[in-house]
Image (spheres, grey):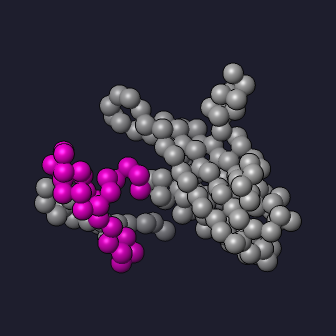
Amino acid sequence: MEHKIETQWMGKLQFNALINGHTIIMDAPERIGGEDAGPIPKPFVLAALSGCTGMDVVSILRKQQIELIDMLITVTGEISKKHPIEYIGVHVKYDFKGLDEYRIQAIEAVNRSQNELCGVSSMMKKAMPVTWSVIYNNQEAFNNDFKQLQKEEW
């Protein structure tokens, strides 16, 4: 099995990618010759990570018949200072709202996604550190962000 996409140049710096029948527009800001008709390509990697792990977590919790009130995933990519400009580290923050009794299951679902299931995270970990934290009902429940932990120790 394989995934295949087609990306068509639309002029200037705009490209349209066809993914499973859905068109994704990529463009550059006007200041560098684009028309800002869509996001630049690199953050799509972060979006892929958030979607992959988010789907894992929701699926795991649903199998346990745990319903969330809300979940927001924020992915931050640290960018290199030299060319090629690339991500050199990524942190995923999961912010859950739900019944307090499901806090441990939410943490376990995130850890299972990050350590066993999410293929995007697995690929990214081969190239850079991927860390994550869990906020549950506005309280930090888990954090393996090594940079953040080091800052707290200073």
- Residue 69 within the segment the image draws in magenta: no
Q: In which quarter of the image is residue 18?
A: bottom left
39 versus 84 height, above or below: below
Residue pushed farthest left? 11
Q: Where is residue 76 in the image (x, y as percent from the top left)?
A: 51, 46
- The picture quadrant where one finds residue 7 is bottom left
In this rendering, is residue 33 above or below 55?
above
The residue positioned 71% from the left and 71% from the top of the image is 68
> In the rendered view, does 35 fall on the left or right side of 44?
left
In this picture, is 1 found above or below 30?
below
- Residue 4 lies, in percent from the top left, at 38, 66
**Which span is picked out in magenta?**
19-44
Would residue 114 appear left or right of 78 to someone viewing this image?
Answer: right
Quadrant holding the C terminus: top right
Q: Would residue 140 appear left or right of 4 to someone viewing this image?
A: right
Residue 115 seen anywhere in this rendered image of the structure: no
Most foreground residue, 59 or 101: 101
Vertical placement of residue 75 versus 78, above or below:
below
Identified at 48% across, 38% down, the residue is 78
Name, please, the residue furthest toward the top.
154
Single out the residue that lies furthest toward the front: 138
Q: Where is residue 2 in the image (x, y as percent from the top left)?
A: 45, 66
Q: Is 133 situated left or right of 14 in this image?
A: right
- Residue found at the very far right of the displayed protein: 101
Q: Is residue 28 magenta?
A: yes
Q: Give residue 20's position: percent from left, percent from top.
A: 39, 75
